[in-house]
Image (spheres, coloured by chain):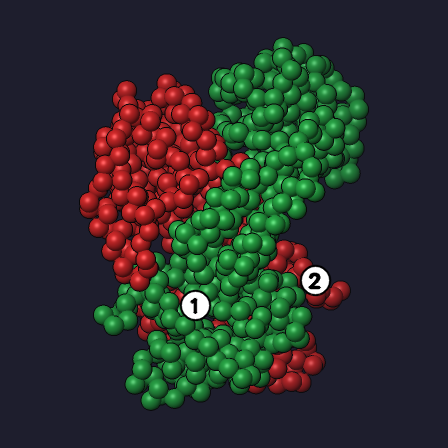
Chain colours: A red, B green
Amino acid sequence: MNAELITIGDELLIGQTVDTNGSWIGEQLNLLGIKVTQISSIRDDREHIISSLNVALNRSDLVILTGGLGPTNDDITKTTLCEFFESQLVLNKQVLQKIETYFKSRGLKMLKVNSDQAMLPNNCETLRNDRGTACGMWFKKNGVDFISLPGVPYEMKGIFLEEILPKLKTQYLTSNVVNKTIKTQGIGESFLAEIIKDWETELVSSGLKLAYLPSPGIVKLRITGFGNNENELAKKIDGFINQLKSLIPNYIFGYEKDRLEEVVGELLKRSGSSLSLAESCTGGNIAHLITAISGSSAYYKGSVVAYSNEIKEQLLNVSPNLIKNNGAVSKEVVEQMAIGVKNAFNTDYAIATSGIAGPSGGTKQKPVGTVWIAVANKENVISKKFSLGNNRERNILISSLSALNMLRLMLLN
Amino acid sequence: MNAELITIGDELLIGQTVDTNGSWIGEQLNLLGIKVTQISSIRDDREHIISSLNVALNRSDLVILTGGLGPTNDDITKTTLCEFFESQLVLNKQVLQKIETYFKSRGLKMLKVNSDQAMLPNNCETLRNDRGTACGMWFKKNGVDFISLPGVPYEMKGIFLEEILPKLKTQYLTSNVVNKTIKTQGIGESFLAEIIKDWETELVSSGLKLAYLPSPGIVKLRITGFGNNENELAKKIDGFINQLKSLIPNYIFGYEKDRLEEVVGELLKRSGSSLSLAESCTGGNIAHLITAISGSSAYYKGSVVAYSNEIKEQLLNVSPNLIKNNGAVSKEVVEQMAIGVKNAFNTDYAIATSGIAGPSGGTKQKPVGTVWIAVANKENVISKKFSLGNNRERNILISSLSALNMLRLMLLN
């Protein structure tokens, strides 16, 4: 069972856009135990698309294409597929209606190029797109499945998860694959590997697989097992996860698709508590992470992003002397910021950050990457210093995640 | 003159690593006018590597491979290349010495797998790697150039820029290519296409190419021209860009790698103005975008993220009656939020947002996706209503970009 992916678009070949669709679909198929042998990025070019389809037809069982389904002239995937599969374009009234509704609900005028997206091949299965106007299409030729999806990642992922994944599961799965992901914050990959070394050896010798998936601030561990009995596999993996919990209790914040900001939100909701933030170096990113979660208004009241010292003094009640004597990036100031915002917003919990995100602005005593984070509740304020690197984006992200994990631990204790 | 790229590594096919090497090399070659027709990501698999090399041999003039040159067992690219090019591995003493020095300077013990990296094919040109232990290799077969590079991006880029780029320039450059990218905010792809239809027709019939590159809230237009005289080409493209400016003056915010938050920051810096934000539905994302730019503390003072009505009243001085009579998502309230934060933070400009980001929380009168945005300066406050979709992440992003563009237009007028 071999799959291959073809991502279409000139922008992928000239370095304007990095192809993330191939990687994302690759992961989804891998989790199902379907082997992806090749990801080809090719141009919006009729001949090249057709020759790639022919190659795929002769060596793969499943071919997924993305891109080139938009309404503009450079989008030629649909007409090229019609040629390859000898299709006629016919009007799909249901799809036309959906496109009309889509434009009406947004108060937008519909153009001919938009309604043309309801013209679809007569010999494919149409895949609903609830996020845009280009449908997915599922063709079959010589026993090979060909699926064409729009290139916009958000639309592509929606169609994949809702329309394709359930069908692939029933159609392709022979042996079962069970994947479980454990998510950690606050420990680097090599330190983690050192701590869980013996556990890992035992896991691997029991026939399971372990992958380390590091990203800034977070290391995911994925355990994979193949076998006939899904329940048994899951139970075996859960046993290893329970052992892991006792090895690294403070670092594990969640599983699977859990996001740290979501886990923290759940803890706040469950305890009926409220949260406010005073962000300096993280510049609104913690607020952004928290409010990305739907329903966060139940526990999150608001923030002050205090980029200037004036604001720290006026809105957060930090004394000018405290800043003068200790500097804005200090234990004293960040703790006062947390207490100040908690009082001003009248919340149960508060987070504050102050640091030098970089790449410039460091001193010998406080180099770029120095970050102080405080969390406060009604009784306590706890603060911690972090020494990060020179990369601004990374420093903001890691500080945000570290702050959320500090709050999580405070909520649990 | 066709080039193709082959990136090798299991991690690329299972979603563990997004292939950024292909995109980066694609951009470099494109800038030289070398057309990249395909980027293939394939597994560390002998047969698949050889069949990919055979395909490339028959259709391309230049083939660049990355990955699989490391010292571990799963790195099989070098031995597979030896098979394909019928090479013998011989010890390269110079390279061995470099590897020994590399290990000595880091105080590391050298293993056999490390010294084996000095065993190199006898029929290729060796390409220096000053950042690691795996050399690049340049083979020739049937007039086709094959270049193999390590997969670590930092090593690959070093070898490419230092060893390959100069040779490609002298060896390959015949015609020039010029790319220019125009970035727009505030108009959808199909509306844009409708407005610039005649301009596009003229551009295409003059021999240039146009591509639409949409992402949430932003549509990029890329004009490409091939020809002998680079200056003439650039002048011709600039002529079209000038025409475009007069067609869509308010939508174009920048060119090439410009980011909207950076453009707005430059305008603020140039006019010596300061900015504060009152964010409700965007939840800190505008602050996050602005503070992602290094040096933003020169113009950005801070924000209030006012998620609850209390905070809108207490910190932004919005009257409770205004909220009661109009709702928090209204022209009246968002304008008062902008004025309130501008006064509280004593800034020259302010942005405020209030809306229903979704996916829930909508009403019949104010469905999910209803967003009010205001921008204020010392004399004026301007507000605008947006009707977006159901996706929370998208609504937050599009609202943030729309707000920044409203501020940009206010700064220009």
Image spot of residue A410 (x, y percent): 45, 68
Secondary element type, mark 1: loop
Mark 2, residue position:
A360
* Residue at image coords 42%, 32%: A6
Vertical side of B260 occupied by A241: above or below: above
Vertical side of B313 occupied by A209: above or below: above
Mark 1, residue position:
B282
Disc 2 vs disc 1: which is toward the camera? Answer: 1
* Residue at image coords 27%, 37%: A120
Q: Nearer the viewer, residue A137 or A25?
A: A137
Image spot of residue A201 (x, y percent): 47, 35
Vertical side of B394 occupied by A25: above or below: above
B350 vs A147, left or right, is right
Q: Nearer the viewer, residue B353 or A60?
A: B353
Q: Nearer the viewer, residue A340 or B385?
A: B385
Chain letter of disc 2 in the image: A
The reply to whether residue A230 is in sight is: no
* Residue at image coords 61%, 58%: A392
Image spot of residue A382 (x, y percent): 53, 72
Q: Tell me the kind of residue under disc 1.
A: Thr
- Quadrant the N terminus of chain A occupies: top left
B300 vs B45, left or right, is right
* Residue at image coords 35%, 86%: B322
Q: Quadrant of residue A156?
A: top left
